[in-house]
Image (cartoon, rainbow, N blue to C red):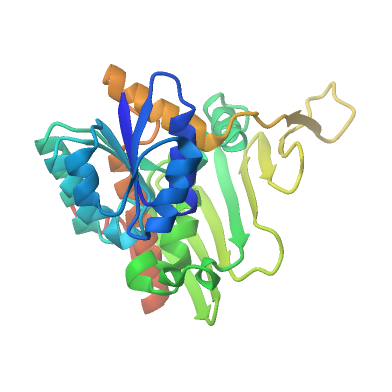
């Protein structure tokens, strides 16, 4: 299978390097309007550099394209690629507006190509194990969840992150990972309430979700944290709690409520993180889905729903009101 990469920044380079080392995949082109970035990615991967999407589309042979561009460009290039008959793997968020996301999904369907969106948290071992603990009933009935994702402000190095109409801010760009994970784990959301404070290289949000099941989750996102990038998550149920913390070397812990025969208050079961890059696991999975026609772990419609949650949080933060879902009746 022949693959090309559009956008040679940080994530584009990750995509390109993974494809270059993937079995039964040939990376035939890398593209960026900043020619030096394209040239560097081409040297790194042994591929061919292009300075425009039009040139790559005309000159390179490929079946699949990875789109790693600023979020406001996802719709335009997904639709252009789909109309050219190319399968699309786009970085998250799927788009910045629900109407755009719907147009992308429909265009890919009409042109007989697949659309995948990189909600990579679904491939992180700790989060996969948390979801598995839920599915296996180890926690009983889920009641409360917390998730946190904080780090420095990317706008310090890439100015487009500072513009809401290009990145969507911390909620749409960063917190959307946890919004997708919690919906995946706990089901559909009924209401969203959010607080958001933005300033010079600072964008902080705190969001409360209520689920159809009755569970409640608090989600924190922060661009502007002076320390290292870090994530935390926990889900508490009627019979136990599962926790993950990126700052711990073996971060997943399941604390089971004690039985009558247990002397200790809790039993801690550590889980070791996997050795494979989650991005590699994700891209291998997407390529396999194209080959076999199978459904992916995260669908384009899941990406639409994650964007819906993020936009509901943005609306709540702007109005000070609780927002009820769905935003658009389908």
Identify the residue shown where x is 50% and y is 30%.
281
The image quadrant of residue 270 is top right
**Residue closest to the far right:** 263
Identify the residue shown where x is 44% and y is 74%.
162
Say if residue 8 shows up in the picture. Answer: no
Q: Is residue 251 left or right of residue 1?
A: right
Residue 53: image location, x then y, percent: 24, 50
For the residue pair 88 and 301, the one nearer the viewer reads as: 88
Seen in the picture, residue 70 relative to 108 is either above or below; the reply is below
Seen in the picture, residue 104 relative to 2 is either above or below; the reply is below
The image quadrant of residue 323 is bottom left
Q: Is residue 255 left or right of residue 80?
A: right
Identify the residue shown where x is 28% and y is 59%.
73
Q: Is residue 291 left or right of residue 272?
A: left
The image quadrant of residue 87 is top left
Seen in the picture, residue 253 relative to 325 is either above or below; the reply is above
Residue 85: image location, x then y, percent: 15, 35
**Residue closest to the far left:** 110
Residue 139: image location, x then y, percent: 62, 33
Locate the N terminus by quadrant.
Answer: top left
Q: Is residue 233 left or right of residue 83?
A: right
Identify the residue shown where x is 65% and y is 68%.
225
């Amino acid at each position: 299978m022949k693959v090309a990469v559009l956008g040679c920044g940080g994530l584009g380079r990750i995509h390109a390097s993974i494809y270059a080392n993937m079995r039964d995949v040939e990376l035939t082109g890398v593209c960026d309007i900043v020619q030096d970035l394209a040239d560097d990615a081409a040297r790194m991967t042994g591929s061919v550099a292009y300075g425009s999407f039009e040139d790559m589309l005309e000159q390179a042979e490929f079946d699949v394209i990875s789109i790693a561009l600023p979020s406001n460009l996802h719709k335009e290039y997904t639709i252009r690629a789909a109309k050219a008959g190319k399968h699309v793997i786009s970085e998250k968020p799927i788009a910045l507006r629900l109407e755009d996301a719907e147009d992308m999904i429909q265009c890919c369907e009409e042109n007989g190509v697949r659309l995948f969106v990189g909600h990579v948290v679904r491939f992180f071992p700790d989060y996969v194990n948390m979801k598995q603990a839920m599915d296996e009933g180890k926690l009983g009935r889920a009641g409360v969840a917390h998730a946190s994702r904080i780090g420095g402000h990317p706008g310090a190095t890439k100015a487009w992150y500072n513009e809401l109409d290009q990145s969507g801010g911390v909620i749409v760009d960063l917190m959307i990972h946890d919004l997708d994970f919690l919906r995946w784990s706990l089901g559909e959301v009924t209401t969203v309430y959010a607080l958001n404070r933005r300033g010079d290289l600072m964008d902080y949000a705190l969001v409360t979700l209520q689920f159809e099941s009755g569970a409640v989750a608090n989600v924190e996102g922060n661009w502007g944290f002076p320390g290292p990038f870090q994530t935390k998550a926990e889900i508490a149920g009627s019979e136990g709690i599962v926790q993950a913390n990126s700052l711990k070397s073996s971060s997943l812990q399941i604390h089971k409520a004690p039985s009558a025969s247990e002397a200790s208050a809790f039993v801690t079961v550590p889980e070791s993180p996997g050795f494979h890059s989650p991005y590699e696991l994700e891209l291998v999975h997407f390529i396999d889905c194209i080959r076999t026609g199978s459904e992916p772990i995260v669908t384009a419609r899941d990406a639409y729903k994650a964007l819906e949650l993020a936009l509901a949080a943005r609306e709540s933060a702007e109005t000070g009101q609780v927002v009820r879902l769905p935003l658009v009746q389908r």
